[in-house]
Amino acid sequence: MSEEDKAAIAAAIKAKKKAKKMAKKRKAIGGGEEGGEEGVEEVAEKENSLGGRMRCAREGLNCTITGSYDGVRNWIARLKEFDPVFNQTEFKLTDSLPDGQHFPGLKAFPVDELVNYGLAGSRAPAISETATHLEPSEYHAKMAEKDTVIIDVRNYYESSIGHFKPPSSGAELIDPKMRKSTEFPVWLDKPETKEKLKNKQVLMYCTGGVRCERASALLREKLKGEDKDLNVKGVYQLQGGIHKYLDEYKGDGGFWHGKNYTFDKRFAHGAKDLEDAGAVATIATCEACSKPWDRFRGKRRCPTCGVPSLVCKECLDMDARGEKRLGKDVRCKLCVEEGIWDKRDVKRKDERELRDYEEKLLKAKGGGGGGGEEELEEEMEMAYDHEPAPNPTNETRLWIGNLNNRVMTIDLLFSVIPNIKFAQWLTNPEGGCRGFCFVEMKSAEDAAYVMGMAGTKVKGRPLKVNYQKADNKSAWPPPNAVYA
């Protein structure tokens, strides 16, 4: 384990302790429970009549909020009063939404990453290393330049209904064709990707700019290290994302083609003037009947990979009436393109690519994929450097996940995690670690101690730990229990 890894784990442990002290401040903009005042959600909902979702991480906030004209602006003013950092925040406002597009309530919840790239903790690239931010007009001009590539860092189903279409003499658009953001680091590390970036200037874009923060920082980190020979001429991202670009080019959409997929109740939108005139181009088709269609509706998902299905209203209605069923052959365009018919094929592909990528990371850090006694001793020392978590119901059964299935063994688990009584060791079809397991601890105090280990890195991966309440539906100890 490198000094950098140990420092990162120590920082994570310190941050966890600090988080408890900061709970009161996070609790409310106008105060906390001790002062008799309401928390952030109550203030926003009751005082300003807001609804929406607020994702909170160490790197910042990502919020989608709906409310009245005055309510939203009053909330922004309160944020700026609370902390001057919000004076530099770019708030994207869309007025005159129909009442049906308002969120009914406000939810705030903590996350490890604002966007899940699988780069939490010590893997996270420094946010200070993000790309140069370009305003829409500057980005528009860059898209017309030669020796330039544009990376759409959104998911494939988003880009399928709308994306940039630069002039033929300008930049080349690259779609990573991801089903989820955790695939981006693997895609960025592929030789064919690096070949496309070589000797080019790189532009990135996403819906509102948040995903580009982490994606561009990762690329710039790699360009300073293992990929410095790519001779990339510069890395740039669209300030404010597609949302701000379409506000700037609301007349004709600029180089934008189709609609911008959103995660709020608008679902998708184009340039305003084109929308008002009913002239936004429909560039996608229904997965069932192939007619032009660009609206994700209903709860149906691709039966092989699970991404939202792009199926027209008529086909959904016929399926609901039993006139024409949407079978397993109605798959997303990416599964059709890749020839995937079974969800297990997607899982195997993802697991294989992730294993190869993580093995490379381990080798780059000197781990060699297997580790040695010295590294194991360091991990065991780090395992004890934390505080126990609360265990009010005195649980003794735990779920332990995010195990490195490339190298993790039951013996290694017993060595790293103290005072396990027995474990339900789960294996994959190849006989290796499945990535998670269930354990019975010797006491409730031991379980609380291991809960406090959450985030501690073992063989390159931060542990995930949850209490697993006992039930009467399954035998415990299980028949395949392995005793320490």
Image (cartoon, rainbow, N blue to C red):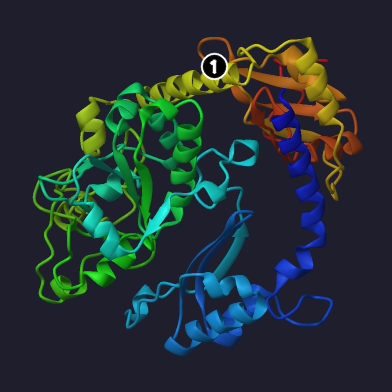
Residue 471 visible in the shown view: no
Q: Nearer the viewer, residue 258 or 98?
A: 258
Residue drawn 74% across the image and 43% down it: 12
Point 46% across, 40% down: residue: 220
The amino acid on which the numbered mark 1 sits, given as a three-letter code, is Asn
The residue where tag 1 is placed is 428
Residue in front for this viewpoint, 414 or 481: 414
Q: Position of residue 232 (x, y in %)?
A: 35, 36
- Quarter of the C terminus within the rendering: top right
Q: Is residue 66 left or right of residue 385?
A: left
Seen in the picture, residue 352 relative to 171 is either above or below; the reply is above
The image quarter containing residue 83 is bottom right
Mark 1: secondary structure: loop
Q: Residue at x 71, y 67 (%)?
A: 26
Q: Position of residue 204 (x, y in %)?
A: 34, 48
Residue 193 position, x and y percent, is 32, 29
Q: Residues within 10 Å of mark 1 (few under 14, many from 20)?
A: few
Q: Nearer the viewer, residue 152 or 291?
A: 152
Seen in the picture, residue 443 relative to 103 is either above or below; the reply is above
